[in-house]
Structure formats: structure tokens, C-alpha cells
Image: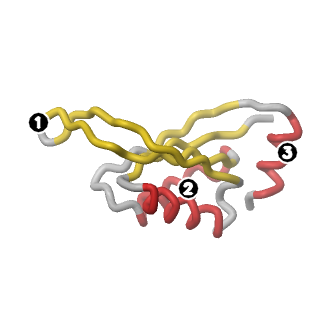
Amino acid sequence: MSFIVIYITHSSEAEAKRVSDHLLQQKLVACANIFPINSAYWWQGQIQYEGEWVSIVKTTLENWEKVKFEVEKIHPYDVPCIMKIEVEANNAYEQWIRDEVK
């Protein structure tokens, strides 16, 4: 058994919580971890340095397209970062994730 984590960047803690709450309320993810980061990236021909927030949400592989669609629908960024990473964990944790999502 395996599952996925989805890494999503946000402009603020409030935005990260809003997106995570939306996914949790729809039972598309089992949980979310939210934390601050410092980002450096190219944008419109220049290197940018910004404080951002990341949410790492955990769900089943079957929910990937639904989660991606929902995030793209409500995320304020022109080009949101929504990355899927397939992972494995202890059996009890993986089963908990499967039990908590639709």
C-alpha cells in the first residue's frame, strides 16, 4: 500500500489554512501540515525572494486529480505549485489515510 503527499505553496498562513480546510472539508485529504518557508524563484524575468507558506497534504493516489483540480480552482497564484510525491509509511498510518478520505 502507498499514498501521496501533495506539496502546495501559498502567500500566507491564512491562505494555506483556507486551501487545506477546503480539501479537508471535502474529505479529499486526511491531514495537512502547514509551515513557513523562504522561497527564491524566477518570475517575470527576475529572481524573487519571498516568504511563503507550504501545506503538505496527505491523500490517496486516486484523489490526485480531484485535489489538483480543487486547488487550481481556489488558489490565488497565477501559477500555483502543486506537486505530487508518492510515499510509503507504516501500515497503520497508510490505513488511517485511506479511512479518512473518500
Q: Which picture quadrant has residue 92?
A: top right
The residue shown at (81%, 35%) is 1
Estimate the x, y position of residue 12 in percent, counting from the top left: 39, 55
- Assess whether mark 3 and mark 1 are in contact (beta carbons under 8 angstroms): no
Residue type, label 2:
Val
Location of residue 41 in the rendering, given as x and y in whole percent from the top left corner: 26, 34
Quadrant in the rendering for residue 26: bottom right
Residue located 71% across and 54% down the image: 30
Mark 2 → mark 3, Cα distance in angstroms: 19 Å
Examine the rendered structure and indicate whether residue 92 appears above or below residue 21. above
Q: Residue at x 58, y 65 (%)?
A: 21
* Residue identifier under label 1: 45
Residue type, label 1:
Gly
The residue singled out by tag 3 in the image is 95
Residue 11: give x, y in percent of width and height. 35, 53
Whether 76 is drawn above or below 5: the answer is below
Categorize mark 2 by other alpha carbons within 10 Å: few (<14), some (14-19), many (20+): many
Residue furthest to the right in view is 92
Which SS class for mark 3?
helix
Q: Residue 67 carries which label?
A: 2
* 88 to 19, vertically: above or below: above
Amino acid type of the residue tagged 3 in the rendering: Gln
Q: Could you tell which of marks 1 and 3 lies nearer the N-terminus? A: 1
